Image (cartoon, rainbow, N blue to C red):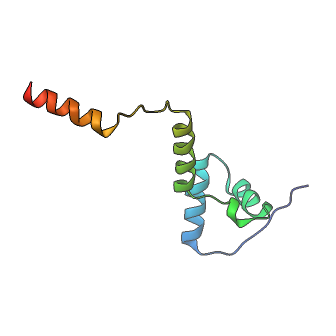
Amino acid sequence: MKKKLTLTVQEDIIKYAKRKAKRRGISVSQMFEEVIGTDEASEIEIEQQRAAKRLLKRIDKAKPVTTKNDKKLIKEHVHRKFA
């Protein structure tokens, strides 16, 4: 059962919470439940952490890059330069 809760916080924190909730597409109440409802504070992620996770997922899905050894690269360079 849900109940109403009144909090007294600074006005700039209220504005920040509303902006953050809007960016996430949820209400401030839902965001509050997510934050307070979790046992570990480490589950709260900032945008940069979420972006890093998305980047790591994309890197994992990427095809491996084939590399050439140094001797072969030098040989190709010399060939192009003096050919």
Q: Give the residue furthest to the right.
A: 1
Q: Where residue 31 appears, x then y in whole percent? A: 69, 56
Is residue 19 placed above or below 78 in the rendered structure? below
- Observer-nearest of 57 and 1: 57
The residue at the point 60 percent across, 48 percent down is 24
The residue at the point 87 percent across, 56 percent down is 2
Query: Residue 15 occupies which quadrant of the picture?
Result: bottom right
Q: Does residue 79 appear left or right of residue 28 in this picture?
A: left
- Observer-nearest of 61 and 22: 61
Q: Where residue 51 appears, x then y in whole percent? A: 52, 49
The residue at the point 78 percent across, 61 percent down is 38
Q: Where residue 54 appears, x then y in whole percent? A: 55, 43
Is residue 83 placed above or below 44 in the rendered structure? above
Is residue 57 placed above or below 39 in the rendered structure? above
Is residue 43 placed above or below 63 in the rendered structure? below
Q: Where residue 10 appears, x then y in whole percent? A: 59, 75
